[in-house]
Each structure stands twice: as C-alpha cells, then as structure tokens.
Amino acid sequence: MSDSILIVDDDEGVRQILAASLTSSGHTVSTADSGERAVALVRETPIDLVVVDLVLPRVDGLEVLREITTLRPETAVIMITGYASVETAIKAMKMGAVDYIVKPFRMEEVELIVARALERSQLRRENAALRRQLQMSWGLQNLIGQSPEIRRIQQMVEQVASARSAALVTGAPGTGKEMVARAIHFSGERRQQPFMAVSCAGIPEALLEDELFGHARGAGPDATSDRTGRIAAADGGTLFLDEVSGLSPSLQARLLRVLQEREVQPIGSTAKVPVDVRVIAASTGDLKALVAEGRFREDLYYRLSVIHVHMPALKERREDIPLLVQHVLARCCREMNVPLKHFSGDALRTLSEASWPGNVRQLENIVERSVALSFGREELGREDLPRDLLDEGALEMPLLHVGGDGFSLDEVLATYEQRMLYQALEHSGWVKTRAAEMLKIKRTTLIEKMKRLGIPLKGNAVAGAALVVEAADASRRTS
Ligand SMILES: Nc1ncnc2c1ncn2[C@@H]1O[C@H](COP(=O)(O)OP(=O)(O)OP(=O)(O)O)[C@@H](O)[C@H]1O
Ligand SMILES: [Mg+2]
C-alpha cells in the first residue's frame, strides 16, 4: 500500500507542484488550502504524512501541528517555511514536527525529506504494532506493583498458572482483570495454545450463543456452513469469559454443561465435540450477590470460582501509583521516540492522592495524554494534568478556592455529585437499582443524573470515565 500524504498550503501553485511530483513518485496525495480543512481531513482519515506551510491565514502551521499531534500521534508532520522563519521551524520540531523544508525548495530535496520522514514514521507505527502484539502475550512481568495486594496476586498467578482449574477474577473497572487472566494463561503450560476472549456483556443472546458454541451448517437461515465457536477454538488453551454476569440463564446452563462434560455441542448439531479448555471468567460486579439475588446460577458460580482473584482498586494500594506512572511514562516516551520525561513532585503528589475511579486504565489515559500534550518539555507539571484530578482536593474544602473570582457552585456540586454516584455504582457493582437505594433516590433519577453527568450507563465502559475527563477539560477550554 502506498503512503498517504496531505499537502497543506494556501498557495495553489505550491500545492500543485508538490502534489504532482509526490504522486509521480508513487504516493497517494491529497491537498488542503487551509489549516481548518487540513485538521478536518486528518480527523476523518488516518494519514501517514502531512506537509504543511507554516504561514496560513487563521489556523497556521503550528496550530495544525498541535492538532495533529493530539488527534493522531502516529502521523508525521513536515513544515514548509520561508528562509526568514527557520527559527519557527525549529520550534515546530520541538513541538513534534519531524522535519522542515525551506522555500524556495528543489523537488529532489523535498523527495529526500519526505522519504526520510515516511521511513521514520513507519518505524514508529511498527513499534506501536509490536507493543500491541506483546500486550497480546503478556506474562506476569507486565503486572506492575509491589504493594502486598499485588505481590499476593503475583504469587497466586504463579501457583495456579499450570493448573487446569477454572478461575474467577473480580474487581472494579480498569483494575487489571483481563491482564491477570492473560498472565495466568501465559505463565502456564497452556501458553502455546490459544487464549480466546469473549465478552458476555451487551451482546444479544443468540449472537453470543453462536459466538461461544458455533453452529452446524443449516442450523439457521444464515448458517450456510459449519462455524467453530470460541469454546472449541480455545481447545487446549484458555477461554476468557469477560463480564460473565452478562450470560443469560439458558447460556449459563449450557456453559455449565460444557464445564461438567468437557464437550461442546454446536447449535443445530447432534454431535458433541470433546474440548479441553481452561475457563477464566471476569466480573466487575459482585457475582456472589447476583447468586444471592437468583440472577446467577449458584452451581456455575462454584464451578467458575475454584480459584478466586480479587483485584483491589488503585486507591487501596496507593504505593503502586508512582511505579505505574513511571512504567506508563517510560513506555509512552519510548513509543514516541522522545527522551524520558518526568513529573514534578507536585504533579506526582496529585497523582498519588487522586481517587482513581477508573483505576489503572484511567491512570494510563491521563499519563499518556500528559505526555502527548507536553511537546518538547521534559518536566510535566500539575498544569499538565486534567482538571478533574486537580479539583479532587478542592472537593473536600471548596472554601479554599474562594479567591478573588470565587468559584462556581454548580460546578463544584456537579463534580461532587458525579463522585458520589461513581462511589455508589462501584459499591453496588454497577447494579443501578442498588446504587439508587444506596443514594436514596429513584432508579430513574439515578439514570437521569448519570446521563447528565456523562457517566457511562454500563459498568465496564471505563472509556466513559476518560471521556468525562475529556469533556470537563473541553468545557474549560471553551469557557
Ligand atoms: N498491575 C498493572 N500493571 C500494569 N498495567 C496494568 C496493571 N493493571 C492494569 N493495567 C493496565 O490497565 C489497563 C486496564 O487493564 P484491564 O483491561 O486488564 O482491566 P479490566 O479490569 O479488565 O477492566 P474492565 O473492567 O474495564 O474491562 C490495561 O491497559 C492494562 O495494561
Ligand atoms: Mg476487561
């Protein structure tokens, strides 16, 4: 596939020359005549390289660069600049541009700079892909932490890795449930065999059944051929059932049969296929409470929880926060090919004292975001952290913030409300009826508030928590 290049210049002549030449050397070229248009294009589709004129009306080259670094950190940017503004071009490089072209330019020179930039950005993309691959096969060494809680979990993972017994991993969103499931699989004797992950939440029952059990040809109008389900595909390895509380009663019964008989029967088939799978299930909510409420089969619960690992919330093991921050920071800087950055003492303190409702995933998001937005700076300060995190301290004592400008009561109350809601939802395993009881409000009122405050209606949608952060931030920028 050829590389995609976007040329941004308000001078039609320059656009045409560059486009013609780069197209003839085999690149896919698009053009934009303004910064606004360029940013819109990059937002729509990923582009490998953007060549942008520094001087543009309204949104200039530096602005475009800043947007692209945030939107698509993997896109390379080259600045075009007049001889007089080479210094600004150097500033652009500090902000993340990979190179610059000085006007008037010769086409051979441009070709060279473009080729070099593309090569480097491909390397960067490959690194990112490699990392994703590694994450697919993470072992115990990826489980960062030295709190007594994490140590105990690491020991437990080692002990049970090679057993065949089912395991249940519970914990709040983003605490590392899937990570531990993978660590168990990849530390054990089954590590060469498949690790199949299936999420049981939010999928229509029929689809999930098909996904798990597969079907025989002719089982339904769409079943034009045999299809192997995930259970059979995991043969010899591990089946990871994420959000297992999402299984309907009938699927719970079918799964129980698989575990008891070690056989799987595809939909519409009379034959049973023997399978040897280890099942690891994960649940955000309290599965035991669901058993008590009669919503999850007790026999299945005991089958699944032969080994039980509970992931503590990040705020219950604060000593791991600096380690995690360091780990994520190092990884980001490596990936972005920049020298290792660090947080100021103040910023670290804020990170260590935050409440982390979205746990490790939220911490990852915040650190990654701070690095991406810090450009050339080596030290990241408190001002690089999203406002939510900074305001947490203020919640306990909003009076401290009454300065010359005062504070917005609505905003403080909304943040407070949001946190109380998160707490109740976490305590109730995201069962809204129970959370509402806890807050002594009606369930419908709770849902209304969740919508208004941008809290995801599903427990495991932690991406939602990150969105809340982003949204709060955006509102600050516009205000
Ligand atoms: N102890 C840890 N060390 C390093 N990274 C961690 C640790 N725990 C979690 N993470 C990272 O945090 C992110 C969330 O972890 P994971 O997906 O395993 O959480 P989860 O409990 O399955 O979340 P959810 O309930 O939202 O599905 C991942 O990117 C993972 O790499
Ligand atoms: Mg998960």
Image (cartoon, helix red, strand yellow):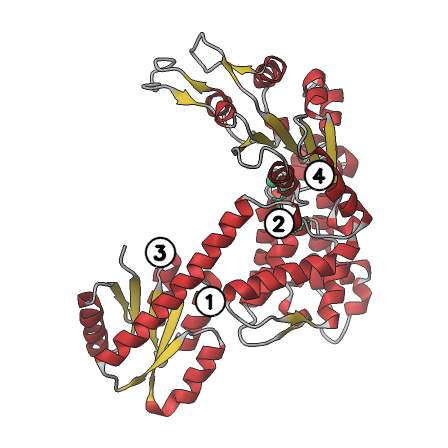
The CA span between labels 4 and 2 is 29 Å
The answer to whether the residue labelled 4 contacts the one labelled 2, judged by CB atoms less than 8 Å apart, is no
Please identify, in this view, whether the residue under mark 2 or under mark 3 is nearer the observer.
Answer: 3
Please identify, in this view, whether the residue under mark 4 or under mark 1 is nearer the observer.
Answer: 4
**Mark 3: amino acid:** Thr
The answer to whether the residue labelled 2 contacts the one labelled 3, judged by CB atoms less than 8 Å apart, is no
Q: Residue furthest bottom?
A: 84
Q: Mark 4 or mark 3: name the one nearer the start of the chain.
A: 3
**Disc 2 target residue:** 465
Q: Is residue 7 left or right of residue 148?
A: left
**Mark 2: amino acid:** Ala
The CA span between labels 4 and 1 is 39 Å
Occupied quadrant, residue 449: top right
Q: Is residue 50 above or below residue 156?
A: below
Q: Mark 1 or mark 2: name the one nearer the start of the chain.
A: 1
**Disc 3 target residue:** 45
The answer to whether the residue labelled 1 contacts the one labelled 2, judged by CB atoms less than 8 Å apart, is no
The CA span between labels 3 and 1 is 14 Å
| Residue at image location 27% in from the left, 77% down from the top | 110
| Residue at image location 77% in from the left, 51% down from the top | 315
